[in-house]
Image: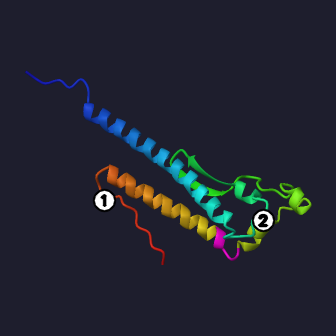
Amino acid sequence: MPIKITQNTVKEGMDNLGTSLIDAVRNGLTAVAIESAKNTRDRQANNEFWNNQSGNAIDSISGEMDDGEKSIGVAIGFEDGRPNEKDAPEFYSGRDHEYAEYIADREGMSFTAAMQQILIGNFTRFMDSLGMKLGSTSSRGKRSDK
């Protein structure tokens, strides 16, 4: 008597596993973005990058996860349009000098490089954690400070 397969549970299980894995990556990258923005704000609160007076530029730093059609990305930086020139008139007569100091520092790259370092460090820890949860060390990220 022939055996008839009416449902492929292996394929269904693999589809469910794939969906769960992608959801875990999305959630993890959202957490990476939020944590990286917090780490950056915490470091700037100590005047690490520019002279912090109003706190306005610090409040403008945020992180986000971008879920594209074929890729998932994560970024940290200033929110679109913030801080703008009129954000802190009580401190600077209409000019946000903290943001101007950041712009002036771009060539020195200390702030941009620090944001990238924070983001890469948090992303690497997330990938290591994800690899451990999957029971595999082959997916572990490697990073060099050289």
The span picked out in magenta is: 107-111
* Residue at 53% from the left image edge and 44% from the top image edge: 69
Image coordinates for residue 95, horizontal then vertical, percent: 87, 62
Distance of label 2 from label 1 (alpha carbons): 43 Å
* Residue at 37% from the left image edge and 41% from the top image edge: 18
Quarter of the image where one finds residue 3: top left
Determine whether the residue tagged by mark 1 lies in a helix, strand or loop.
Answer: loop
Q: Earlier in the sequence, mark 2 or mark 1?
A: 2
Query: Which label number is shown at residue 137?
Result: 1
144 lies above or below 26 = below
Q: Amino acid type of disc 1?
A: Thr
5 lies above or below 32 = above
How many neighbours does mark 2 have within 10 angstroms: few (below 14), some (14-19), or many (20 or more)? many
- What's the image's color scheme? rainbow
In the visual, does 41 lie left or right of 67?
right
In the visual, does 11 lie left or right of 108?
left
Farthest right residue in view: 93
Image coordinates for residue 40, horizontal then vertical, percent: 62, 61
Q: Amino acid type of disc 2?
A: Glu
Is-magenta flag for residue 118?
A: no
* Residue beneath disc 2: 98
* Residue at 49% from the left image edge and 44% from the top image edge: 27
Residue 60 visible to an observer of this rendering: no
Image coordinates for residue 100, horizontal then vertical, percent: 80, 67
* Residue at 73% from the left image edge and 70% from the top image edge: 50
Prevailing secondary structure of the magenta residues = loop
146 lies above or below 115 = below
How many neighbours does mark 1 have within 10 angstroms: few (below 14), some (14-19), or many (20 or more)? few
Residue 94 visible to an observer of this rendering: yes
Image coordinates for residue 15, horizontal then vertical, percent: 35, 37
